[in-house]
Image: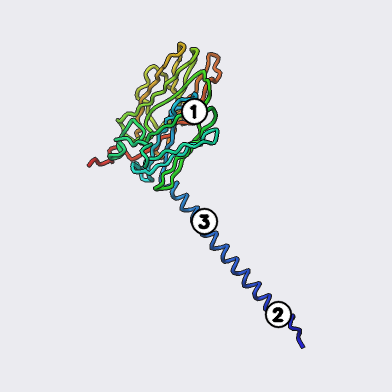
Amino acid sequence: MWDKKNNRLPLFILVFFLVGVLLIIILIVSNKKFDKQLSDSLKVQKSAFMALNTDKSVYLVGEPVYIYVSAIDKEGNTLCKCDLDINVLGPDGGEVSLSTSKGDISIATACSGNGGKTNDPDYQSYFNALKEGQYNIRITDLNSNLTAQKTVDVTGEAEISVSRYGTTRVNPSETERYHMVIKVISKEGFKGILQEFISLSFDVVWKGEASVENIDESQVEKISWDLDLKPGEIKELKYDYVVPKADAQVFNLGKVIILGSNSDKIFEEKDPWNLTVGKELNLIIVE
């Protein structure tokens, strides 16, 4: 006679096999679900572009940190109805929350219209940096899940302060100019050179007191100003550029670099100035 235990062995093997098959099916389905979620996330990132800038990369304690933002879809249409949420994490773990829904983030008039040419950021906000250290800024469009982030430093003392203001979105045009303003302040006085870098896809059409030169084997040109600052003096450096055409949807300006009298680097921005590139202006229909 067969032992009952031996009779149970084939049944145990069958159950074990079926459980294994079921686990494999669950893993395959889970992986496909994860792959789809990842693919959907990547599609969001590829279908829209966001530029996030601050007016400075290094601040003094107590200064306001101005945040400038723009966003476009993959067709170059300006996203003027973003539901933006900005989260700022301070060096002591404190958080600041800003949003369009609460009115903490303002929307430019040019954006709320047809997304045409503007010399101002599409979205603006600010917070006060009250402690020394690093601040992490993260912005999310709750409508599309598009995100961007950057960090800024806050210090108790700085020899040179550099800030800038300009648009965060450009629309290709043969004639429409965009302005960039770079402001420099020296606490003790300073002599040297400030350099800004701009893509060769852009045309510098006015440079004021600056000089412009192409950099060998590079896709950028260098704009330079001679600085001779008195203690506490504020110097504004400006240039105008046009964007006749664009083969990308995101461009950078900078980083600003300041060199001393011995060509030693005194200052360098942490990040370049980001620009989204919208539709050509002559293709935008004004209703």
Taking depth in this image into account, of 272 and 143 the one nearest to the observer is 143
Of label 2 and label 1, which has the lower sequence position? 2
Indicate the position of residue 21 as horizontal and vertical percent values: 61, 69
Please name the residue shown 47% across and 16% down the image. Answer: 186
Could you say which disc has been placed on residue 35 in the image?
3
Please name the residue shown 50% across and 52% down the image. Answer: 38
How many angstroms separate mark 2 from mark 3 (CA)? 41 Å
Q: Quadrant of residue 235?
A: top left
| Residue 2 to residue 190: above or below | below
The amino acid pointed to by label 1 is Leu
Q: Report the residue marked by disc 1.
A: 130
Residue 245 seen: no
User: Looking at this rendering, what residue extends furthest in the bottom direction?
Assistant: 1
The amino acid pointed to by label 3 is Asp
Point out the frontmost of discs 2 and 3: 2
User: Looking at this rendering, what residue extends furthest in the left direction?
Assistant: 287
Please name the residue shown 38% across and 26% down the image. Answer: 180
Indicate the position of residue 139 as horizontal and vertical percent values: 45, 40
Could you say which disc has been placed on residue 8 in the image?
2
Q: Determine crowd level at label 2: few under 14, some 14-19, many 20+ residues with C-alpha closer than 10 A.
A: few
